[in-house]
Image (tube, rainbow, N blue to C red):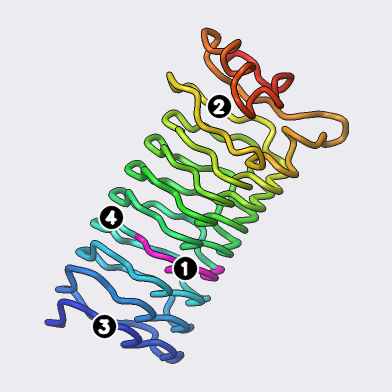
Amino acid sequence: PNLTSVGQYAFEGCVSMSSYNLPKLNGSIANYAFGYCNALTSLNFSLVKSVGAYTFQYCSYVTSLSFPELTSVYGYAFRGCQRITTVSLPKVNYLSTQCFSGCSRITTVNLPSAVNLYAGCFSYLTTCTSYSLPLVTLIGSSVFYSNYALTELTLPKASTFSAYAFRYCSSLMNLYLPGSSIPVLTATAFANMPFSVSVGGVFGSIHVPSSMLASYKASTNWATYSNRIVAI
């Protein structure tokens, strides 16, 4: 109970460990620390501020997360945690490569403080229908790759859409961009989804402020989707 930090590989592969008692853990949890702990069903770390790479990967029976002080999530940290349904991390502002990739039962993501989303961090969240990302500016490569169930998304502060950011978001029919500046758009950000390929003969819509409509339609790479860009 007096442990304040957990080192690399500390509990990795402890497949029968169903609980822990670490109330004073208040810094970071190192890489791989709890990977493949398949008997864990919940993760509750009230003081932890950073979760390292691969820390909880394939903890496949975890259904809930509670990290009220967490600010940073590193690569593959929760990859393959297939029974998590909701992600609500109030202080997280940094999410690295594929940190929730393959968490296929997540339906809701609430990250009120997040700013940067890096490569594939929400890739293959195939049942997710709701994201709350009010402060996010950077959408890295493949962030929403294969989010098949997502039908609409609002990104008030978006500044950059990287390669394949929305690839195979086959149900995303409405993207709302109410911000006051036009994000940088990589040419492949909307590959293989309804802004570039019709769904049953219908294309999706990109909603922007009416005062910026003409500017969007004339901007680099946005011009390709001029027929999809409409006023909010």
Label 1 close to label 3 by CB (< 8 Å) = no
Q: Quadrant of residue 32?
A: bottom left
Q: Which residue is mark 1?
A: 76
What residue did someone put label 2 on? Answer: 176
What whole-number distance in Å separates the C-alpha atoms at marks 3 and 4?
19 Å
| Left or right: 180, with 113 as reference point | right
The answer for how far apart the CA atoms under marks 3 and 2 are is 42 Å
Disc sitting over residue 130 in the figure: none
Q: Which mark is residue 71?
A: 4
Instruction: For label 2, count other residues whose C-alpha is less than 10 Å away and answer few (under 14), some (14-19) or many (20+).
Output: some
In the depicted structure, whether residue 29 falls above or below residue 142: below
Q: Position of residue 183 (x, y in %)?
A: 50, 29
Q: Amino acid at mark 4?
A: Thr
109 or 219: nearer the viewer: 219
Q: Secondary structure at mark 1?
A: loop
Q: Earlier in the sequence, mark 3 or mark 4?
A: 3
Which residue does the image show at 47% across and 75% down from the upper left? 57
Earlier sequence position, callout 1 versus callout 2: 1
Hey, what amino acid is under mark 1?
Tyr
Q: Amino acid at mark 2?
A: Tyr
